[in-house]
Every structure is written in C-alpha cells, then in structure tokens.
Amino acid sequence: AQKVTQAQTEISVVEKEDVTLDCVYETRDTTYYLFWYKQPPSGELVFLIRRNSFDEQNEISGRYSWNFQKSTSSFNFTITASQVVDSAVYFCALSEGRSGGGADGLTFGKGTHLIIQP
Amino acid sequence: ETGVTQTPRHLVMGMTNKKSLKCEQHLGHNAMYWYKQSAKKPLELMFVYNFKEQTENNSVPSRFSPECPNSSHLFLHLHTLQPEDSALYLCASSQGGLRTGELFFGEGSRLTVL
C-alpha cells in the first residue's frame, strides 16, 4: 500500500527565511509519481509540481525548489526567501504507476501548515 | 470564470435533510473527482468519473451519491448524513482521463451536519 508522511504539522518562520517542507513516501511500485499542492486560505488546492520516479533531477522554479531522493524515499520542498503570501497548507501526494500517474490513484499526506510572519 | 466552480460554498444541514453539492468545470477536462477533507486527516478520494463513467468508488457510504450528467458537471447528493460527515468537500478535474496527475480544484463546499 502507498503512504505519504508529512511529519511537520505546522511550521512558522519569519519572512525572508528559507524553509523546507519534508515529504517521505512509501510504495512498492517502481513507477510512481510525486506531487506538491498548495492550499491557500481560500480553499482550492493549487498544483505546484509533478515528478515521475525515473527523473531524480532536482527542480527549481523561482523561489521554489524540490529535492527528490529515491534512496531515502523523500521529495522535499524548499521555499527560499519566504514571503507572507506563501502562507498556506502544503500537501505532498503520490500516485502509483498502475494509473500512469493518473489522479485516481493520488494519496495525499496530511499536509504542513506553513505560516510566514511579517 | 474560474476553472472549477463549486456551490454552495457553505452548507449546514440536519441529519434527515437531503441536499446536493454542485461542481462545474470550464476547462474542457474529461475527468472529475470528489475529495473529502476532514480536519487533521489526509484528503480522501471519494469518487472518480472519467468521460461521465464512474471509475472509482473508494468505499464511500451510500448516503453519498454522485452524479455526473456530462463531463462538465458533477454532483454529490447527500442524504441522512452523520455529524462526522462534516468536512470540506473538494471537487477537481483533470485532462487526459487517467493519465495526468495535475488536478484543478474548486474552492470547496464546507459542510456542517448538525
């Protein structure tokens, strides 16, 4: 069975600090997909990134970066120079290969509530 | 228009009431989903529709009844709910049926069962 663990329930940092959100996953599949979603106070989840299990290259998008390490089954998310607008709940999710990365197989972690203080 | 619209945004109902949640997507997607988000629990997938056909029912109690009349609309009919069903119900859509993980979510319908 697949499982996603986000051990950090809540993180609070001061604006401009860097912050890393941890995600550890479990799966028996060799083909799988990992995701990060952001949920601002308005409620809707916003897709941030999708990664397949064969691509371990780290990715950077502006102030966001992702570190995928199969050896430790982790897919951590770092925000550099955090801003108040980054305050949200962030979810890590996993989809196993049987669905080709399809959303029907998405398993979410419990989320990390990130608070950026001005 | 936002991509995925959910109505109502807030709903309070008694255990004997019958109500429905509505979801509409304006993205031309062909797959739609219902998720349940309870406090301190992971998002739970409830139902998946692909090209109007239900492809997944994640052991959801029969007091929740989905309906997908076309690829743009999805309903969740509620009947004889329990207080523990109080949660945020999120609708989502995706393109490419089962072959994409990028979900587009609505803002959710906050349900309170008294």
Image (cartoon, helix red, strand yellow):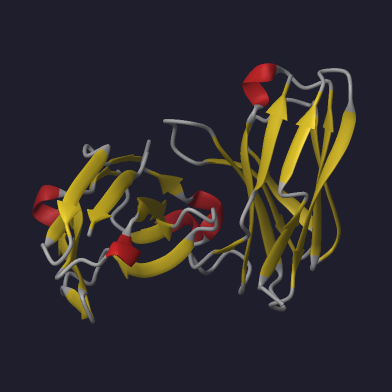
Is B85 left or right of B52, judged from the image as shown?
left
Is A61 left or right of B79, judged from the image as shown?
left
> Residue B18 in the image: x percent, y percent?
90, 30
Q: Is residue B114 above or below residue A42?
A: above
Residue sitting at x 51%, y 69%: B100
Is A46 left or right of A76, judged from the image as shown?
right
Q: Is residue A28 above or below residue B41?
A: below
Question: Considering depth in this image, is A38 or A103 the residue closer to the camera?
Answer: A38
Residue sitting at x 21%, y 45%: A11
Q: Which part of the image, by quadrant, shows the N terminus of chain B?
A: bottom right
Residue A21 visible in the picture: no
> Residue A49 in the image: x percent, y percent?
35, 69
> Residue A112 in the image: x percent, y percent?
30, 45
Q: Is residue B85 above or below residue A63?
A: above
Is B93 left or right of A93, judged from the image as shown?
right
Q: Residue furthest front?
A: A118
Residue sitting at x 83%, y 20%: B80
Residue A49 visible in the picture: yes
Q: Residue furthest bottom?
A: A62
Residue sitting at x 79%, y 68%: B72
> Residue A92 in the image: x percent, y percent?
34, 52
Question: Considering depth in this image, is B60 or A62 the residue closer to the camera?
Answer: A62
**For residue A82, what is the image quadrant?**
bottom left
**For residue B79, what is the image quadrant?**
top right
Q: Is residue B57 above or below residue A106?
A: above
Question: Considering depth in this image, is A112 or B77 the residue closer to the camera?
Answer: A112
The number of discs equals: 0
Q: Which part of the image, by quadrant, shows the C terminus of chain B?
A: top right
